[in-house]
Amino acid sequence: MQTFPHLYRNGLICFKETLFNEGIRGLYAGTVPALVANIAENSVLFCAYGVCQNAVKFLIRKENVLDLNPLENATAGFFAAFFSSFSLCPTELIKCRLQAMRETSAQESAKRPQIGPWLLTKEIFKSEGILGFFRGFGVTVIREMPGYFFFFGGYELSRNMLTPKGKTKDDIGLLRTIIAGGIGGVSFWVAIFPADVIKSRLQISKSNDSTIEVTKDLMKKEGFRALYKGLGPTVLRTFPASGALFVAFEYTKQFLNYGLSCVK
């Protein structure tokens, strides 16, 4: 929907067309690079987030990371996203090209055989070199940094609001953690969706147009609404996904802290 809006008016039509033309497998195009992207990005992101929290704590002279308010946590998330962009951009590029392969072939009037992530990776490396994997890196950073400001800010603000009197944020339980994580995920995508659309267009494009040129061309031909094409399915996806992500993060952190305390 982001890259070929003229073909799909809404999410249901896109779903039906993909299922009819490509079958169940078509709905999972780009799954492997998407998994790699999520694992790599979140590993780097949450590691960098902890480091950036400590840096923010040091700069504002607070005693403990737990004393940071939502704005300060959001600032830590903003800077952490810069580092995660390096691991995200190449895998996102592979995912976007795999997902748009049928439509791209139709546009080029040449039916390409369906290939997997490994063969596509080799093809990009052969034709574009290492730098080919970082096509769209600038707009990825532009997307990620403000996006994760809202992601962590929305999550921490929601946790604060959902914390009962007399308890801490770590005591809000499973359901409230899912809700807070879902709010953080929705905040992320609503804030940065236009940048994501531009990134997707840039990464599947065969031209050497710059980010500014791609943006101007999109706005001229399709208007402002095209920048939010596909937001509905993304929001439906991100609420449970982000809720699950933060549940995994918080409970893993508690488990590891408990294990360390037992060792000591």
Image (cartoon, grey):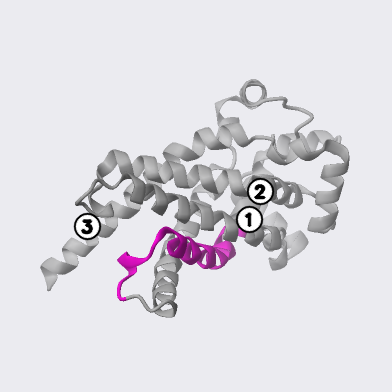
Q: Residues within 10 Å of mark 1 (few under 14, many from 20)?
A: many
Left or right of 81? Residue 65 is left
The residue beneath circle 1 is 143
Q: Residue at x 81, y 33 (%)?
A: 106
Most foreground residue, 261 or 41: 261
Q: Residues within 10 Å of mark 3 (few under 14, many from 20)?
A: few
Q: Secondary structure at mark 2?
A: helix
231 w.r.t. 46: above or below: above
N-terminal label among 3 and 1: 1
Most foreground residue, 62 or 133: 62
- The Cα atoms of the two marked residues, 3 and 1, are separated by 32 Å
Looking at the image, do the residues carrying marks 2 and 1 touch, with CB atoms under 8 Å apart?
yes
14 w.r.t. 105: above or below: above
| Residue 236 point in image, percent of width and height | 51, 33
The residue beneath circle 2 is 196
Q: Is residue 126 magenta?
A: no
Magenta-colored span = 63-89
Instruction: Inspect the image, locate mark 2, and give the three-letter code of the amino acid beneath it.
Output: Asp
- The Cα atoms of the two marked residues, 2 and 1, are separated by 6 Å
Residue 206 is at least partly visible in this image = no
